[in-house]
Amino acid sequence: MFGDWGHGICLLLGSLMLIVRVVATASTGKLELLKSLGVDLAIDYTKENFEELAAKFDVVYDAVCECDKAIKAVKEGGSVVVLTGAVTPPGFRFVVTSNEAVLEKLNPYLESGKVKPVVDPKGPFPFSQLVQAFSYLEAGHAIGKVVIHPIP
């Protein structure tokens, strides 16, 4: 999900009462974006290490290949969900596939604003600039998803 929005780390605190608190990390300049997306606590990863917080988390979603840090932040018996990169137990890889039925179920959430896609404002990149788009993405300064369009 990610480019650098949220630095790809999303931490969830829960309880038996099913209260969910969303905590996410980002660089200093992207903290307001996280807050605008509804994050309860935005952590500046350039100033604070989320894995060293006293609070531990029920679930940690790692989208930036920091599974070892994520494991340090999860409660015993909690889960680390790895979206990309190497997996260190007890983490596990999460792979998303979609089809028309899945996308149809997602559509009402997009239309209502409950799900807010974040697309990098420098895009979309034309397919002829595919190499430049990947270089931009790898530089780590993208905000949200980098879009290539149209794909032949």
Image: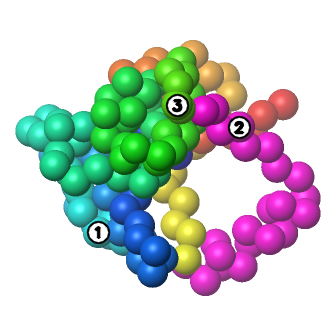
| Residue behind mark 2 | 95
Report whether residue 91 is seen: yes
| Type of amino acid at the residue the image marks with label 3 | Pro
Residue 90 is tagged as 3
Q: Tell me what residue is drawn at x 49 percent, y 55 percent.
A: 118
At label 1, counting other C-alpha atoms closer than 10 Å, the crowd grade (few under 14, some 14-19, many 20 or more) is: some
The quarter of the image holding the C terminus is top right
Q: Tell me what residue is drawn at x 66 percent, y 38 percent.
A: 94
1 is higher (above) or lower (below) than 133: below
Q: Is residue 13 left or right of residue 132?
A: left
Q: Secondary structure at mark 1?
A: loop
| Type of amino acid at the residue the image marks with label 1 | Asp
**Residue 60 drawn at (x, y percent):** 43, 46
| Residue behind mark 1 | 40
Q: Which quadrant holds residue 113? A: bottom right
Q: Which residues are magenta?
A: 92-113
